[in-house]
Amino acid sequence: MIKRVVVLLLLMVFSLASMAEAKIAPDFTLPSYKGGSIRLADLRGKVVYVDFWASWCGPCRKSFPWMNAMHKRYGTKGLVIVAVNLDREAALANQFLKELPPDFHVVFDPRGDVAKRYGIPGMPSSYIVDRNGRIQYSHIGFTETKKADLESRIKAMLGK
């Protein structure tokens, strides 16, 4: 019995320590697809799904309909999706967006400055940022098998 209590206490301490170590999401201000700009710091108080993508990325074509569904399902509950495009040629991004219209925010980082600050390992790379601006989860790629896990993490952070 005492061993179980000690193990539970240790697990709680390590969980709290890992939460405390969550990295602050690098701030950015980038031009928006719909005009104006988006600043990540202005979204504090919301759960933000930051997704880095490019027009040539096959899995990105699958993630856009899913992000539209997540925006529709949880947008009024505190979720904000910001998809950061890394195409150097705006025409390529615009063609992609014409084919897969987003219901969420799309911003442009053609020089990849923000992507470098996040240290993205590949496409797509996504980060779930909590209401305090800390990255709580990140992943690379997008497959059908990841959908349920990602949605579960988003729901948990929204408190739903």
Image (cartoon, grey):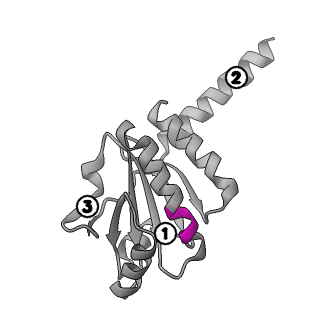
Judge from the rendering whether residue 120 lies leftward or rightward of residue 93; answer left or right: right
Secondary structure under tag 2 reads helix
Specify the principal SS of the magenta part: helix
Judge from the rendering whether residue 86 lies leftward or rightward of residue 8; answer left or right: left
Q: CA–CA distance between discs 3 and 1? A: 20 Å
Q: Residues within 10 Å of mark 3 (few under 14, many from 20)?
A: some
* Residue 127 covered by magenta stretch: no
Residue 110 lies, in percent from the top left, at 35, 81
Q: Which mark is residue 119?
A: 1
Measuring 35% from the left and 66% from the top, which residue is drawn there? Answer: 106
**CB-based contact (under 8 Å), mark 2 and mark 3:** no
Measuring 78% from the left and 18% from the top, which residue is drawn there? Answer: 4
Q: Which mark is residue 8?
A: 2
Judge from the rendering whether residue 147 lies leftward or rightward of residue 45; answer left or right: right
Q: Is residue 134 above or below residue 50?
A: above
Residue 22 lies, in percent from the top left, at 48, 46
Q: Quadrant of the N terminus?
A: top right
Residue interval drawn in magenta = 60-64
Amino acid found under the numbered disc labelled 3: Ile
Secondary structure under tag 3 reads strand
Query: Where does label 3 land, which residue?
Result: 38
Query: Which of the 4 image quarters holds residue 33?
Result: bottom left
Amino acid found under the numbered disc labelled 2: Leu
Residue 134 lies, in percent from the top left, at 42, 47
First along the sequence among labels 2 and 3: 2
Q: Is residue 147 above or below residue 37?
A: above
First along the sequence among labels 1 and 2: 2
First along the sequence among labels 3 and 1: 3
